[in-house]
């Protein structure tokens, strides 16, 4: 059976977005990006979803109409042969031609934008990406249920990894075996990111010094990758004893993400790395208590930066030198880079039922990475952690 998003869930999401449209004096929005389509329509079939500021949305489908009608609980689903038909379809369904039309301008290609510019020559095209991301940032009970399931499966994969790690394996060999454990548990095989040029497979599995190799990705960890064509993640380096092995993997379950990092080692690690890892666990505990509704996201970053500096870890915290990233956590949900960003200068206040991946890490050149990442739910009392696998460094004898 194809899991479907309940109709009342889609209606609740649509209503919240319509409140944003009305507040911004926007008559309607065209939704095209896969993740946003799934959020508002429950399908990623090739479609245009028109959401008016008031009234029922219209899902116009090019391919596959049959699947869209099975997967989506939107009431009005019609065929679409070409975007040129959109104005006539709106009129046919008693939807007035908008004066101001919203588009996801952070993600749609310029060529598509120019197409809509021609189709809606007398219409003011405006960006609604920020409003969409604000609506998506606060999760419903339905979404939280799926994210808890994803978190439990992420924990299972970490447990399976412990039994797979062997000295002499390459990072890629180990990664393939761990990823197989994720896949057989239902991992969807795609980790979605909104950022232009943002790509990720299952995550990063990196051992020893290669874990401290920086990359282009907006992540504290990089890795050599299999080639410059990828330039991140697992490479051909071998797993050796007494080095930290970073398992920073995302479990994506029925669309929803749990982000999760644990550190493994074959044999004991040097004491300085053990102490550094414990420091990151201590910092995580501080941030979990502080992250309550109303707290500015950027304030949590400032707390983390100051704490790391005071403890003598400032030079390695979340990267080194000009390779340091300027965040300590990020929202997760259908995408890996959702609101809020616990980043320098971010004014967005936390809200109850936002979901955040908190990832205090130390990147130590020549040695590797230690630290932690867990997925959390914002509650009135701080962060509720939903990834629960043992946070201590997992020593394999």
Image: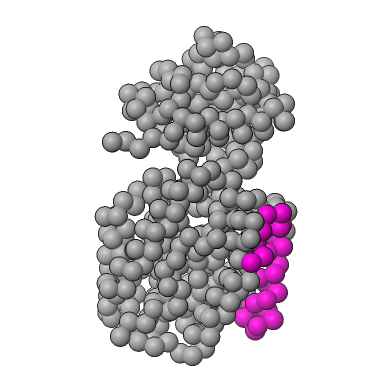
Q: What residue is at 57 percent from the left and 42 percent from the top?
A: 136
Q: Is residue 357 above or below residue 109?
A: below
- Which of 366/318 is in front? 318
User: Can you give x and y, in whole percent of width and height, for residue 312 in the image?
Assistant: 65, 84
Task: Tell me the quarter of the picture where residue 202 sits.
Answer: bottom left
Residue furthest to the bottom:
271
- Residue 256 image position (x, y, % from top left): 44, 48
Please report the bounds of the magenta region as a residue range.
289-315
Does the segment drawn in magenta span residue 293? yes
| Quadrant where the image shows the C terminus | bottom left
Q: Residue at x 55, y 40 (%)?
A: 107
Write the residue at 69% across / 81% down: 310
Residue 210 shows up from this direction:
no
* Left or right of 173, for residue 107: right
Q: Is residue 378 above or below residue 37?
A: below
- Viewer-proximal residue, 117 or 149? 149
Q: Residue at x 66, y 31 (%)?
A: 19
Q: Is-magenta flag for residue 308? A: yes
Q: Position of residue 87 (x, y in %)?
A: 55, 14
């Amino acid at each position: 059976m194809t899991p479907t998003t309940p109709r009342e869930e889609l209606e609740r999401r649509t209503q919240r977005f319509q409140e944003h449209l009305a507040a911004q004096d926007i008559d309607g929005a065209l939704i095209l990006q896969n993740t946003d389509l799934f959020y508002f329509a429950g399908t990623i079939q090739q479609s245009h979803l028109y959401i008016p500021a008031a009234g029922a949305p219209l899902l116009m489908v090019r391919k596959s109409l049959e699947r869209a009608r099975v997967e989506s609980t939107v009431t009005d689903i019609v065929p679409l042969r070409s975007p040129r038909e959109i104005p006539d379809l709106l009129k046919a369904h008693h939807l007035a031609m908008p004066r101001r039309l919203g588009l996801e301008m952070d993600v749609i290609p310029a060529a598509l934008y120019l197409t809509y510019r021609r189709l809606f020559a007398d219409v003011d095209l405006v960006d609604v990406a920020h409003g969409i991301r604000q609506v998506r940032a606060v999760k419903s009970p339905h979404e939280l249920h799926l994210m808890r399931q994803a978190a439990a499966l992420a924990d299972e994969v970490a447990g399976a990894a412990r039994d797979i790690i062997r000295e002499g394996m390459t990072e890629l060999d180990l990664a393939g075996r761990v990823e197989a454990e994720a896949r057989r548990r239902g991992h969807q095989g795609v980790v979605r990111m909104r950022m232009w040029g943002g790509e990720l497979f299952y995550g990063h599995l990196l051992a020893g010094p290669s874990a401290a190799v920086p990359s282009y990705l907006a992540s504290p960890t990089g890795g050599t990758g299999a080639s410059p064509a990828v330039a991140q993640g697992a490479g051909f380096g071998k797993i050796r004893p007494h080095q930290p092995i970073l398992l920073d993997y995302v479990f994506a379950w029925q669309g929803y993400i749990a982000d999760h990092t644990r550190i493994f080692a074959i044999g004991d690690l040097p004491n300085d790395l053990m102490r550094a890892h414990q420091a990151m666990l201590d910092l995580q505990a501080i941030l979990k208590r502080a992250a309550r509704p109303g707290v500015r996201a950027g304030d949590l970053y400032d707390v983390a930066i100051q704490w790391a500096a005071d403890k003598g870890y400032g030079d390695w915290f979340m990267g080194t030198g000009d390779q340091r990233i300027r965040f300590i956590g990020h929202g997760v949900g259908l995408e890996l880079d959702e609101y809020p960003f616990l980043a320098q200068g971010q004014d967005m206040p936390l809200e109850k039922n936002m979901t955040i991946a908190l990832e205090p890490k130390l990147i130590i050149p020549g040695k590797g990475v230690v630290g932690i990442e867990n997925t959390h739910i914002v509650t009135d009392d701080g962060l509720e952690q939903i990834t629960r696998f043992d946070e201590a460094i997992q020593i394999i004898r």
